[in-house]
Image (tube, helix red, strand yellow):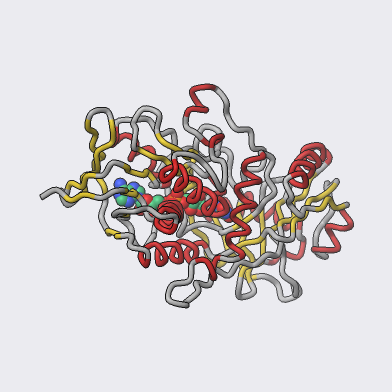
C-alpha cells in the first residue's frame, strides 16, 4: 500500500522545521512528514552556521523579516516549550556594530533611515562613539558606524532542535531518510520516493533542502536556482586583556568578529571569489592570509589570537543572494523555502510563518513574503541587498 501524507517537507534544517512547526501550530489538519537524510546535521547549513542575528539590512523586507524573527527569538523558550520544558537558545543580544569608511557612509545613512522608519532601534555613531563601545577598536579609515543593541547571536543548532521538538510534539513525523524522487501527476506535485524505495503521496511537497534545493528541484523536473557556496567560520583563543564582550563587529573589509563562549572570538568573511560547489573542506590559509590581517588591523589586540577550530559549511545562494519563498510557478503544490545565503537563521521564524500562512490560508498574513517569489528572476526584478555578510 502506498503511504500518504497531507504535507511532505524535504529537509529538517531550521527552515523545514520552522515550516513544520508553524503549519502544525497554525492548524494544519492532517499528516505532516519531514524527510531528513542527515539527522545529526553534520553537513546542514544550520548545523554549521555562525548564528548571527541582525535587523540591519538595506532591503525593506529583509529588515521586516529579521524584525519579526528577533521578536520571536526573544520569546523562543516560552513559544517552543514542550510539557513545560523551554528550549535554551542562548540568544545574546550584544548588538551588531557595522563600521563604514568614507565610501560606505552614504549607504550606511540610507540604511539607517530605512531601518529607523521600520521601527528598528538602530543608532548612527561617530567613530569615537563606536570606540566607546569597543575600546580596542582602531578607527583607521572609519567614518561612522551603526549599532543596534537588539541584534546579536544565538545557538543555531538549539533553535533547529527546539523547532523540531515542538513540531514532533504537535504530530510531525520525522523520517531519517533521503528523498530521491519527486513525483508528479496531471501537472501537479504528487509525492516523493525515498532512497529505500518507498513512495509517499501528498498534495503538497515543500523543498526545504538548503544547499541541495537545486537538486531537489531537478528531481521534481523544475528549475530552482539555488547553488551551494563554501563559507568559513574560525574560532580563536583571545588575549586575556580583552575583558569585555564584543558585539558582532563588521569591518568594511567584510570581516566580522564577535565574542564566543569560553574566552574565544568567532570570526569569518564571505569570500566573493569562492566558486559554487559542494566543498566542505576548510582552508586554514584563508584565515592566515585574509581574515587575520584585517582582524589585527581593526582590533590590534587580536594580533596575538591563537586559531583553535575552523570549519566550512555551505551558503545556499540564489542569483540575488536572497530567499525564495512560495509555490513554484511551474509545479502547483511544490513549495520553496530556501536560498537564504548568509541570513537564514535570522529569517527562519518569519519564513516558516509566511510559508505556513500561504499553504493554509492561500495568502500572507503575519509577514509578507511576496517579494521573495521565484517569479522575480524571470521578471528581472532582483532584490538589491547591499549587506549580505
Ligand atoms: C558557515 C555558515 C555561517 C552562517 N552564518 C549565518 C549567520 O551568522 N546568521 C544567519 O542568519 N545565517 C547564517 N548562515 C545561513 C544559515 O545557517 C542558513 O541560511 C540556514 O541554516 C539554512 O537552513 P535550511 O534549513 O534552509 O538548510 P539546511 O540547514 O542545510 O537544511 C537542509 C536539510 O535538507 C536535508 N536534505 C537535503 N536534501 C535532502 C534529500 N534529498 N532528502 C532528505 N533530506 C535532504 C539536508 O540533509 C539538510 O539537513 C550561515 C551558513 C553557513 C554555512
Residue found at x 77% / y 38%: 107
Who is closer to the viewer here, 374 or 37?
Answer: 374
Is 362 displayed left or right of 126 in the figure? left
Is 221 displayed left or right of 244 in the figure? left
**Residue 112 falls in image quadrant:** top right
- Residue 87 horizontal/vertical position (percent): 50, 72
Q: How many marks?
A: 0
Is 107 displayed left or right of 83 in the figure? right
- Looking at the image, residue 293 lies above or below residue 341: below
- Residue 20 horizontal/vertical position (percent): 40, 55
Is residue 228 in sight in this rendering?
no
- Looking at the image, residue 32 lies above or below residue 271: below
- Residue 174 horizontal/vertical position (percent): 30, 60
Residue found at x 31% / y 34%: 218
In this view, which residue lies farthest toward the top?
379
Who is closer to the viewer here, 185 or 58?
Answer: 185
- Looking at the image, residue 50 lies above or below residue 5: below
Is residue 320 in sight in this rendering?
yes
Residue found at x 83% / y 50%: 124
**Residue 268 falls in image quadrant:** bottom right
Who is closer to the viewer here, 256 or 366?
Answer: 366
Who is closer to the viewer here, 225 or 164?
Answer: 164
Residue found at x 26% / y 39%: 182
- Residue 145 horizontal/vertical position (percent): 81, 50
Amino acid at each position: 500500500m502506498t503511504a500518504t501524507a497531507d504535507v511532505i517537507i524535504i529537509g529538517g534544517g531550521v527552515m523545514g522545521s520552522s515550516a513544520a512547526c508553524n503549519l502544525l501550530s497554525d492548524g494544519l489538519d492532517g499528516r505532516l512528514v519531514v524527510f531528513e537524510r542527515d539527522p545529526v546535521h553534520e553537513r546542514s547549513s544550520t548545523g554549521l552556521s555562525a548564528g548571527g542575528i541582525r535587523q540591519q539590512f538595506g532591503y525593506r523586507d529583509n529588515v521586516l523579516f529579521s524584525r519579526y524573527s528577533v521578536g520571536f527569538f526573544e520569546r523562543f523558550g516560552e513559544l517552543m516549550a514542550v510539557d513545560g520544558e523551554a528550549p535554551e537558545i542562548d540568544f545574546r543580544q550584544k548588538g551588531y556594530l557595522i563600521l563604514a569608511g568614507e565610501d560606505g557612509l552614504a549607504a550606511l545613512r540610507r540604511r539607517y533611515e530605512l531601518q529607523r522608519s521600520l521601527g528598528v532601534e538602530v543608532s548612527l555613531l561617530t567613530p569615537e562613539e563606536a570606540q566607546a563601545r569597543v575600546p580596542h577598536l582602531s578607527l583607521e579609515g572609519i567614518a561612522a558606524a551603526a549599532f543596534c543593541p537588539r541584534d546579536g547571536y544565538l545557538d543555531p543548532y538549539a533553535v533547529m532542535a527546539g523547532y523540531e521538538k515542538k513540531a514532533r510534539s504537535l504530530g510531525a513525523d520525522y523520517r531519517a531518510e533521503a528523498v530521491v524522487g519527486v513525483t508528479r501527476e496531471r501537472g501537479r506535485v504528487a509525492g516523493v520516493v525515498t532512497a529505500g524505495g518507498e513512495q509517499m503521496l501528498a498534495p503538497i511537497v515543500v523543498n526545504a533542502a538548503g544547499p541541495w534545493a537545486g537538486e531537489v528541484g531537478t528531481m521534481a523536473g523544475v528549475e530552482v536556482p539555488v547553488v551551494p557556496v563554501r563559507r568559513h567560520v574560525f574560532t580563536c583563543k583571545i588575549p586575556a586583556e580583552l575583558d569585555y564582550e564584543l558585539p558582532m563587529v563588521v569591518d568594511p573589509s567584510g570581516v566580522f568578529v564577535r565574542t564566543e563562549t569560553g574566552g574565544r572570538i568567532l570570526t569569518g568573511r564571505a569570500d566573493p571569489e569562492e566558486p559554487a560547489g559542494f566543498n566542505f573542506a576548510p582552508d586554514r590559509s584563508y584565515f592566515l592570509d585574509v581574515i587575520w590581517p584585517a582582524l589585527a588591523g581593526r582590533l590590534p589586540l587580536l594580533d596575538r589570537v591563537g586559531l583553535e577550530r575552523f570549519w566550512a559549511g555551505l551558503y545556499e545562494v540564489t542569483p540575488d543572494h536572497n530567499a525564495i519563498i512560495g509555490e513554484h510557478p511551474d509545479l502547483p503544490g511544490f513549495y520553496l523555502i530556501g536560498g537564504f545565503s548568509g541570513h537564514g537563521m535570522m529569517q527562519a521564524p518569519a519564513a516558516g510563518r509566511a510559508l505556513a500562512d500561504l499553504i493554509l490560508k492561500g495568502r500572507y498574513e503575519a509577514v509578507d513574503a511576496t517579494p521573495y517569489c521565484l517569479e522575480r528572476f524571470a521578471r528581472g526584478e532582483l532584490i538589491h541587498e547591499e549587506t549580505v555578510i
